[in-house]
Amino acid sequence: MTLALGCIADDYTGASDLANTLTRSGLRTVQTIGVPADDLALPEVDAVVVSLKSRSIESDLAVSRSRAAEKWLRGRGASHVLFKICSTFDSTDKGNIGPVMDALRADCGERIVLVTPAFPEVGRTVYMGNLFVGSVPLNESPLKDHPLNPMHDSNLVRVLARQSKTRIGLLDLAVLSRGGGAVRARLADLVGQGVGAAIVDAVFDSDLETIGNVALDHRLSVGASGIGLGLARALVASRKVRPNPSTAMSDAPVGGPAACLAGSCSQATLGQIANAEKTMVVLHLDPERVVAGKEEGRRALAWANERLEQGPVLIASSSTPDQVAALQARHGREAAGHAIEQTMADIAEGLVRSGVRRLVVAGGETSGAVVDRLGIPGFLVGAEIAPGVPVLRAVGGKKGQKESAEQGEMLLALKSGNFGGPEFFSDALKLMR
Ligand code: ADP
């Protein structure tokens, strides 16, 4: 297999967002959790998104993990690698965008890297190197108060220059609007001036297409899902990839019992659970008993095992905000959250052992705990259930434990709390046959 595009994402949900964008643009895409083992068997795909959790860790560690991911992707034939960052350029003067970009650029011998976090469909645009979030500059947006990386400067040429050893330049909209030839000429000028990375303006999807087209001449780019869209469209337009309908890879039915787990306490999820009561049996865990020990998880599994044959089941720990606050006051926020996540992972593991091959999980952290426990190294991205929530087909799996998952015969849907419409659980199961 030769990858048309390799991607390294600096967090899990950003990786899913990119994988979803690439799939919608016609690329068969796998999202892996961490750097895959060398012997991971993958189906024929056009793109792989390696998900790391490297946005806010020590920059040395972010660099070493990203380099390992790049090595794996290049080993699978990726001639272009996109380092996927947040569309609000989340970073500090220490990194990690600059240090990772510098290291990957050195590894692949690229002379000039195209950098843009623009993603117009979600209101992220770049003009004269300044990033706008909706109608306001980055430094006036809510990102100015981000707990980990407050963004106080909207000029990305300055922001990136502070965290990179590379000389940073600007490729502005006036040049971009003149098309690929003008962009290439400007990049050559910048290289002549010793510039090694250029912040590229983009306001419309058509700008991203121009950028994607030019970026394919290079080994490395840096940006958000927007440049992913541009690269994917350029790959399809140049016939380097034959466009694939987004559902093609996820159509083969998996069958078997289906189950849903909800660990999110968001308002949207609470409403979705209430609606699910109409179409499936629902067990509400007693959160106090979950924190007390393993017995509540075992009780839930026994309850599910008696019902799985008759139709889908839903097991929820979700409570209202005042109940959540009361539990946290008694046990501490972290201890309560961790105990519930681990119980959800125990239940997921037991359900899969009982034959469940279609699993829906509500809650970002809850999903992370479940995926890590099931040892699923990656997903093939399929049809979209709701904006940002695709059907996922597991690829690979823990040796000896999930033979079925190893053959790609397990479907998952992982949604962060606020995502999905009122009937999310039944909507998901309708697409997960
Ligand atoms: P979301 O995507 O809505 O943020 P997460 O799964 O990321 O959902 O986070 C929800 C957190 O709340 C998890 O740590 C989960 O274990 C915890 N949790 C779930 N149910 C309860 C409950 N009844 N009381 C307190 N915490 C809970």
Image (tube, rainbow, N blue to C red):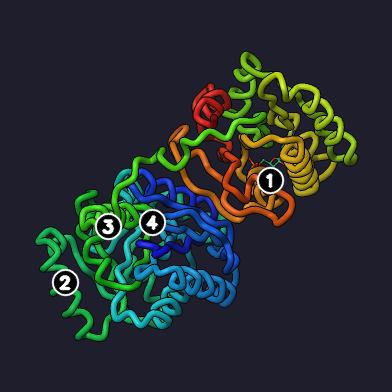
Numbered label tally: 4
Judge by depth and name the residue closer to the eye, 154 or 342: 342
Ligand 1 within 8 angstroms of badge 1 C-beta: no
Relative side of 78 to 276, left or right: left
Q: Quarter containing ligand 1? A: top right
Disc nearer the start of the sequence (2/4): 4
Which residue is the site of mark 1? Answer: 370
Disc nearer the start of the sequence (1/2): 2
Which residue is the site of mark 2? Answer: 184
Disc nearer the start of the sequence (4/1): 4
The local secondary structure at tag 4 comes to loop
Q: Residue at x 60, y 29 (%)?
A: 269
The local secondary structure at tag 3 comes to helix
Q: Residue at x 56, y 53 (%)?
A: 378
Separation of marks 3 and 2 at Cα, in angstroms: 18 Å
- Tell me if I can see residue 131 in this picture: yes
Which residue is the site of mark 3? Answer: 235
Q: Report if the CB atoms under discs 4 and 1 are less than 8 Å apart.
A: no
Which residue is the site of mark 4? Answer: 46
- Tell me if I can see residue 319 in this picture: no
Q: Quadrant of residue 282?
A: top right
